[in-house]
Image (cartoon, rainbow, N blue to C red):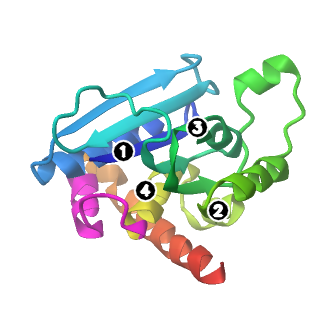
Amino acid sequence: MTNVLISGVGGQGTVLASKLIAAAAMAKELDVRTTETIGMAQRGGSVVSHVRIGQNINSPLIPQRAAHAVIGFEPAEAVRVLPYLSADGLMIVCDKAMKPVTSSLKGDTYKVYEMIDYLKKHVKKLVVIDGEKLMSECINAKTLNVALLGAASESGVFPFNVDEMKDALRDTLPQRYLDINLNSFEIGRRMYNETRNAG
């Protein structure tokens, strides 16, 4: 079984990312279950998508300490779901902050470097993607989710390969958005490798 958790805030495309992973799994005739837990059902609220791929999936929800990978679209949300990551699990996190509504309501001071430092201390396999660089290279910032899927695909965490993930993009996304998303997917793959090599 492969368990992947995607965390972010409303408007970042976490739900679409989980659907794309599920589409790639189904195309390979793998069993898959997905679900979302949404803290506040609006743009800026916490959103966590659970994706489970394998046999005998009794629940779509990933138990704590059972995620093989966490894809964090936002640093604070990545910290929030850290209890789900397995001891040897991989976390890929974008270091670009989008202050969650929960933080705004509490009046919290949100310092990105504190979140990243915390993850560095508590995650054995951590890949931090430079969010400013990623967003400057992607033609459209709304494709950040697909770029991070590219990074995750390059890591080998999914039970399907990069080309199969790209086929899912072609089969799922509207034609008019396909090229821009495929471009961002490839940027995410490259940035994953650059980050790994630099580390």
Range of residues picked out in magenta: 155-171
Q: Which mark sits nearer the N-terminus, 3 or 4?
A: 3
Q: Can you say whether 195 is above or below 168 in the image?
A: below
Is the residue under label 3 in contact with that under label 1 (CB below 8 Å)? no
Report the mark closest to the observer, 1 or 3.
3
Q: Secondary structure at mark 4?
A: helix
Q: Mark 4: few, some, or many residues within 10 Å (few <14, many ≥20)?
A: many
Task: Report how far apart the C-alphas of labels 1 and 3 lie in the structure.
Answer: 14 Å
* Residue behind mark 2: 128
The circle drawn on residue 83 is 3
Residue 184 percent location from the top left of the image: 46, 63
Marks 2 and 3, how far apart at CA: 18 Å
Circle 3: element type: helix
Quadrant in the picture for the C terminus: bottom right
**What amino acid does circle 3 point to?**
Pro
Extreme-front residue of the structure: 87
Q: Residue at x 28, y 59 (%)?
A: 165
Depth check, mark 3 against mark 4: the one in front is 3
Question: Is residue 176 on the magenta stretch?
Answer: no
Majority secondary structure in the magenta region = helix
140 vs 1, nearest the viewer: 1
Q: Is residue 23 above or below residue 36?
A: below
Q: Do labels 1 and 4 touch, CB within 8 Å?
A: no
Dot 1: few (<14), some (14–19), or many (≥20) neighbours within 10 Å?
A: many
Left or right: residue 89 compared with residue 159: right
Q: Are marks 2 and 3 in contact (CB under 8 Å)?
A: no
Question: Where residue 149 is drawn, which disc sits there?
Answer: 4
Residue 175 x/y as whole percent = 27, 51
Which numbered disc, 1 or 3, marks the residue that appears first in the sequence? 1
Give the number of the mark in front: 2 or 1: 1
Front disc: 2 or 4:
2
